[in-house]
């Protein structure tokens, strides 16, 4: 990754040595590269040049406001999945006309917020079930408007990714079965508060093979033709996200080849195209900077115990995900490696970043970088074990800024109150 390279023996984010960030901000800390975000966005935008495409960043991957603001300034819209994400997207300056609302459990309140965002309401609701259609219609009709709707189709395609991030199989909770689509569109068109405008799919995340996309696009194009034949004015096709990135030695698809599939199967339908990339835009734009608290030789193996834990980066514990982990001080060339377990301080055996990982000699107090931690890392963090959320730092050339500070214990308890009876005098 060109944005995180060794210079003069020290790992840098763009022009900033990570050791400087550690000294000024402390560890653990997430570090994001602005240049990486710009590069990823540009590569996708270029791949789709000439097509009417909206890149709606799936902000569930990382909802840091500065990062959102930067992607928004490049032209990105937002794919949101909650009222909270909607408010953050608006706060970051993303226009309602570029916001798409997905998710299986939208509440009335969230629907109302989205319908009233700005003066216009948002671009599109991706509806996942018939009860949701009914509720959205009621809420919209109550406000005297029609909600622009794409129905999420579950194409029953195997995305060939980890089972916990596959979403387009019949047994997954997402979307409406391909076979029932015509009936559900007919139902939607008859509802007073719904305007049927599009079709949506999202088959999974971290796809490293284009074949499932092609299967999906072929099915989708047939469906759009059938829907138009039934009188529906389908104007937008939302292809979801899912483009994989390299964590280890994967060969993720080139976005140009992905765009070629879209040109072949989807573009001839003459619709506006929406994409919802998350991981692709931010995954390799961030790392988690951490310090080795202890090197613990044990009977069976040696542990590197870090000051970052599963609460900061849960992907290895949740998905058995692989992250490269490298010393901030460049290892001498040809340094021998030995297998170690790299773990966090949390009281869970699952708090393990890597088992039996070959590492060059690492000393207590040394800094390490856990790479590819821009997506689904800070976004999934928690304060488990009363550990403060790690701060977020954005690098821009040879400058950096703290874009979310480390909370104090007062911040961490700010929402808590003790019941009045604790302070009432005993009779
Ligand atoms: C509906 C939807 N769109 C987009 C995404 C983003 O996926 P990715 O980060 O793999 O691009 C997700 C992720 O789960 C999703 O559920």
Image (spheres, helix red, strand yellow):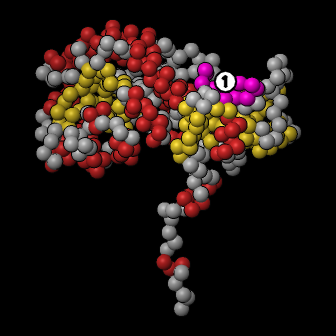
Residue drawn 40% across and 27% down?
A: 74
- In the rendered image, residue 181 lying in the magenta stretch gets the answer no
From the viewer's side, name the closer residue of 88 and 181. Answer: 88
Please determine whether, in this image, residue 256 is positioned above or below residue 168. above
Viewed as shown, does residue 246 lie left or right of 178? right
Residue 381 pos. (x, y %): 55, 44
For label 1, the residue is: 5
Residue drawn 29% across and 12% down?
A: 267
Q: Quadrant of residue 17?
A: top right
Viewed as shown, does residue 89 lie left or right of 243? left
Please determine whether, in this image, residue 263 is positioned above or below residue 180. above
Q: Which residue is situated farthest in the front direction here? A: 398
Residue 250 pos. (x, y %): 59, 17
From the viewer's side, name the closer residue of 19 and 278. Answer: 19
Q: Quadrant of residue 257?
A: top left
Please determine whether, in this image, residue 101 is positioned above or below residue 245. below
Residue 149 pos. (x, y %): 23, 33
Instruction: Report if residue 135 is visible in the image.
Output: no
Mark 1 element type: strand
- In the rendered image, residue 7 lying in the magenta stretch gets the answer yes
Viewed as shown, does residue 93 lie left or right of 375? left
Residue 396 pos. (x, y %): 55, 32
Residue drawn 43% across and 26% down?
A: 277
The residue range painted magenta reads 1-13
Magenta stretch: helix, strand or loop mostly: strand
User: What is the crowding at mark 1: few (fewer than 14 residues within 10 Å), some, or many (at least 20)?
Assistant: some
Q: Quadrant of the N terminus?
A: top right
Q: Quadrant of the C terminus?
A: bottom right
From the viewer's side, name the closer residue of 137 and 286. Answer: 286
């Amino acid at each position: 990754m060109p944005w995180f390279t060794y210079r003069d023996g020290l790992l840098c984010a763009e022009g900033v040595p990570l050791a400087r960030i550690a000294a000024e901000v402390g560890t653990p800390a997430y570090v994001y590269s602005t240049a990486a975000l710009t590069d990823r966005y540009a590569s996708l935008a270029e791949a789709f040049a000439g097509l009417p495409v909206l890149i709606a960043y799936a902000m569930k991957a990382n909802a840091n406001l500065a990062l959102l603001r930067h992607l928004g300034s490049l032209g990105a819209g937002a794919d949101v999945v909650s009222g909270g994400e909607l408010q953050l997207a608006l706060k970051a300056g993303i226009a309602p006309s570029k916001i798409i609302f997905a998710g299986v459990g939208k509440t009335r309140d969230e629907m109302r917020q989205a319908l009233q965002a700005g003066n216009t309401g948002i671009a599109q609701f991706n509806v996942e079930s018939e009860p949701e259609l009914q509720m959205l219609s009621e809420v919209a009709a109550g406000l005297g408007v029609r909600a622009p709707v794409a129905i999420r189709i579950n194409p029953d395609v195997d995305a060939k990714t980890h089972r916990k991030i596959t979403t387009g199989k019949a047994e997954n909770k997402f979307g409406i079965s391909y076979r029932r689509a015509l009936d559900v569109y007919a139902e939607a068109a008859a509802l007073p508060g719904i305007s049927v405008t599009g079709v949506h799919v999202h088959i999974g995340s971290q796809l490293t093979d284009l074949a499932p996309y092609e299967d999906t696009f072929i099915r989708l194009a047939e469906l759009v033709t059938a829907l138009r034949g039934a009188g529906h004015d389908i104007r937008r096709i939302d292809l979801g996200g899912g483009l994989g990135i390299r964590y280890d030695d994967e060969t993720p698809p080139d976005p140009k080849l992905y765009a070629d599939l879209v040109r072949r199967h989807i573009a001839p339908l003459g619709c506006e195209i929406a994409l919802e990339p998350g991981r692709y835009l931010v995954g390799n734009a961030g790392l988690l900077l951490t310090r080795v608290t202890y090197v613990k030789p044990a009977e069976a193996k040696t542990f590197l115990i870090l000051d970052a834990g599963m609460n900061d980066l849960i992907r290895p514990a949740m998905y058995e995900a692989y992250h490269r982990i490298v010393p901030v001080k460049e290892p001498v060339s040809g340094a021998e490696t030995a297998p170690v377990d790299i773990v966090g301080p949390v009281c869970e055996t699952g708090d393990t970043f890597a088992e039996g990982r070959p590492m060059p000699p690492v000393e207590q107090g040394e800094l390490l970088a856990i790479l590819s931690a821009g997506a689904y890392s800070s976004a999934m963090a928690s304060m488990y074990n009363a550990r403060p959320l790690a701060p977020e730092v954005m690098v821009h050339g040879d400058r950096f800024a703290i874009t979310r500070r480390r909370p104090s214990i007062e911040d961490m308890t700010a929402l808590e109150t003790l019941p009045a009876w604790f302070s009432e005098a005993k009779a």
